[in-house]
Structure formats: structure tokens, C-alpha cells
Image (cartoon, grey):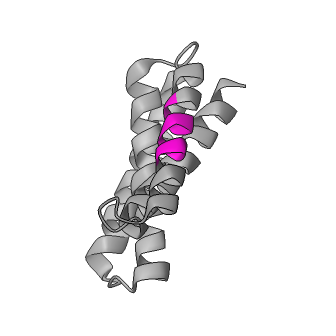
Amino acid sequence: MQWIYLLIAGFFEVAWAVGLKLSCGFTNVAVSILTILEMIASFYFLALALKNIPLGTAYGVWTGIGTIGTVVFGILLFKEPITIMRIICIMLIVSGVTGLKILSA
């Protein structure tokens, strides 16, 4: 169950990072409130996951999900560039997160 909590925490991390961009420096009040709620949810589910998952593994997976998710949303929503180096870096993050998951079992 802790891995599901960690996955949920990662999804909320992506949501609040995108929310930060859309809040325009917290000038859009509705988006800002939603972003803060997403931050709280992300930390809450990360805290639940940390009950049984090693800190380094949980944090690495959480930030990995956040990094990959924000890059994907940056490309899809904000027309950020897709380059071979970005794709290679994403693949390195995925392999690192996968390694942390496998080695923590």
C-alpha cells in the first residue's frame, strides 16, 4: 500500500508544479489555492509512504515522478522543446528510480 501512496504523492507533486506555473506567481487566486492543496496532499501521501519505505528510496521515486511528469506536462501544455538530450536525461531518471525501487525490496 505504501507504494500506492508514493505514486499518489508523485502525481500530486506534478499537479502542484504545474499549478505553480499556472498560478502566475500566486496572482491567480483560485489556481493558487488549488496548488497549495495539492502541495499538502503530496506531502501527506509522501508521509504515509515513508512509514515503510526507506527515506532515500521514497524521496528519489517521489522526485523522479515529479521531474518526469513536469517535463512531460511542460512539453504538452507549455510547448517546451523536445530534444534528444532531454529524452536521454528522462531515461536516466527512469532507470535510477527503477533501480531504487528494485534495490529497496
x%, y% of residue 70? 43, 62
Most foreground residue, 20 or 7 = 20
Q: Residue at x 44, y 28 (%)?
A: 57
Q: Relative to 82, say whether 39 is above or below.
A: above
Residue 77 painted magenta: no
Most foreground residue, 69 or 39 = 39
What is the number of callouts on the image? 0
Q: Residue at x 40, y 64 (%)?
A: 23
Most foreground residue, 78 or 36 = 36
Q: Residue at x 39, y 36 (%)?
A: 60
Q: Residue furthest right?
A: 1
x%, y% of residue 66? 44, 51
- Rendered image quadrant of residue 1: top right
x%, y% of residue 72? 47, 70
* Left or right, residue 6 beside residue 60: right
**Do we see residue 105 in this rendering?**
no
x%, y% of residue 59? 41, 31
- Is the magenta region chiefly helix, strand or loop? helix
Q: Relative to 54, say whether 27 is above or below.
A: below
Q: Relative to 52, say whether 81 is above or below.
A: below
Which residues lie in the magenta part? Answer: 36-43
Name the quadrant of the C terminus. top right
**Do we see residue 48 in this rendering?**
yes
- Rendered image quadrant of residue 102: top right
Most foreground residue, 61 or 30 = 30
Q: Residue at x 34, y 82 (%)?
A: 80
